[in-house]
Image (cartoon, rainbow, N blue to C red):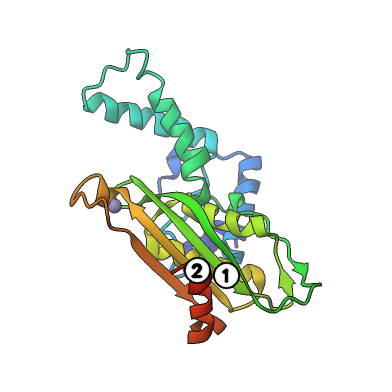
Amino acid sequence: MKQNEILLNILPNGNGIHKHNVKINQQEEANHELALIDAIGDEHIATSYDTPLRPDAFLMDDTSKMQEIEKHFEAIMNILGLDLTDDSLKGTPHRVAKMYVQEIFSGLNPKNRPDIKLFENKYQYKEMLVEKNITFYSNCEHHFVPIIGKAHVAYISNGYVIGLSKLNRIVQYYAKRPQVQERLTVQIAEDLKMALQTDDVAVLIDAEHLCVSSRGIKDVNSSTVTASYSGKFQEEATRLEFLKYIGK
Ligand SMILES: [Zn+2]
């Protein structure tokens, strides 16, 4: 069975697949298969906390995606009445397309997931490790405007540790998707549990949603807090210790 058939079986609601748009050569096919294998291996497919992705999400290569987005964004600007012959505006569709695919939505593609290596916990450090104030920029999937926040993550080693920068990178990877904050929190927590091979993981996110502060209700003072506590962090004493470290 081909990988994409497996995916279609897992995601039976994979309607609206437009393969006629998709150019596939052998290299892309190989990359695609790898991406799917990663996706399935990471359990990012067919799970309740998964980002709703189409089964054919990575059949199109990044260059083709940028070309398509550029065309469509140009159409949006035209409809808004903007003069795309103006020097300041004419490069905008290209810049937006590049930014979407290579930067702010690059976390959609499993090939961009940080490579996580586990190290033996040689110090025998058995207390919690907290990485706090990880600044991230994401985008609300309902309005495509920024979510700006701080993530605080913690774990208790199960005999293995990962490089501190990897905690940061996991946060950034999941932030670079159209998101809702609850899902972002759970995705980070689940990936950390898998990467660290322990359930003893906590994630707390405090973020400002520009769809709340810059439009709609225009509340500039509110922020949204979400948390995920697993394993030992479900015990009150452990959770309070974590909250004390992050100053909450
Ligand atoms: Zn929104």
Nearer-the-camera pick, 176 or 19: 176
In the rendered view, does 10 fall on the left or right side of 182?
right
Of marks 1 and 2, which one's residue comes earlier in the chain?
1
Q: State the image coordinates of residue 228 (x, y, percent, origin top left).
A: 46, 73
The residue tagged 2 is 203
Mark 1 residue's CB less than 8 Å from ligand 1? no
Q: State the image coordinates of residue 192 (x, y, percent, origin top left).
A: 59, 67
Q: State the image coordinates of residue 165 (x, y, percent, origin top left).
A: 65, 55
Residue at 49% x, 77% y is: 229
In the rendered view, does 88 fall on the left or right side of 117?
left
> What amino acid does circle 1 point to?
Ala
Q: Residues within 10 Å of mark 2 (few under 14, many from 20)?
A: many
* Res 177 seen here: yes
C-alpha separation, residue under disc 1 versus residue under disc 2? 7 Å
- Occupied quadrant, residue 13: bottom left
- Which image quarter is the C terminus in? bottom left
> What amino acid does circle 2 point to?
Val
The residue tagged 1 is 154
Residue at 41% x, 64% y is: 183
Nearer-the-camera pick, 91 or 14: 91
Q: State the image coordinates of residue 21 (x, y, percent, origin top left).
A: 44, 38
- Occupied quadrant, residue 18: top left
Considering the numbered disc 1 on the image, is that residue within a helix, a strand or a loop?
Answer: strand
Residue at 51% x, 57% y is: 133
> How many callouts does the rendering have?
2
